[in-house]
Amino acid sequence: MKMLLRAGCVVLLSATFLACSNSKQNKGDAYFNKGKYEEAVGEYSETLKFNPNDVTSLYNRGRAFEEQGQYDSALNDFEKAMQIDPNNFQILLSIANIHYLNKEYSKSLLFANRAEEISGAPATASFMKGRALHQLGNTLDAMKAYNNAIKLDKDFAQAYFNRGMLKVATNKKRGGCEDFQLANGLEYPGAKEALEKYCK
């Protein structure tokens, strides 16, 4: 289940930034899109030799490191990118995600909060804020953050699922089952199993 949740967030994080890369695709992007992350790192590193402040290459190399489980290297690239572009919510969310994966929930919350405050931030920012608050045991604020994520994106299956888990954990089984049903309708992996486990 943890792997499913991680995978969902990674997909959310990667889609936006890669789509914003330069119109002429870097060879690293082609490798990344094929799942050849080690080769992608090599190509992004070549680009960075000539332009060490290329935010897109730093970010994408960080994502390639992250896909390989090299979280320290990923965090290093994301932090360098953030120094160049401190108001880029995608970079802030990626840093939040690395801290979350490292079980550093307070740090994850800090960066998710920063991302959420930026104009135009996606629903993912509120979701990641909720996820960190959930782990820190702040159920009331976690619920508010999940609610906001869903308000911003009515089709955010993972937010419904996580909100359902939070409701079940706080003895609001009926509401949790409704959220699992919504997540299942949006084909979120694990929602069907949650329905069978908690809602029979």
Image (cartoon, grey):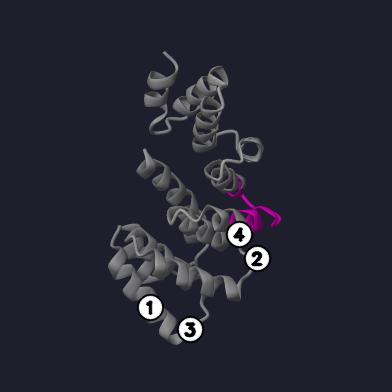
Residue in the image at 57% along x and 44% along y: 127
163, above or below 133, in the image: above
With respect to residue 165, does 53 lie above or below?
A: below
Q: Which mark is residue 2?
A: none
Dot 1: what SS? helix
In screen coordinates, is 162 left or right of 25?
right
User: Relative to residue 26, is residue 141 drawn left or right?
Assistant: right
For disc 4, the marked residue is 89
What's the residue at 38%, 42% (across, down)? 2
Q: Could you tell me the amino acid type at mark 1? A: Ser
Q: Residue at x 34, y 71 (%)?
A: 41
Q: How crowded is mark 3: few (under 14 residues within 10 Å), some or many (20 or more)?
A: few
**Mark with earlier residue (3, 4):** 3
Kind of residue indicated by mark 2: Asn
Residue at the disc numbered 3: 51
Which residue does the numbered mark 1 point to in the structure image?
45
- The region drawn magenta spans 111-125
Q: Do the residues labelled 1 and 2 touch (CB within 8 Å)?
A: no
Give the residue pinned by disc 2: 87
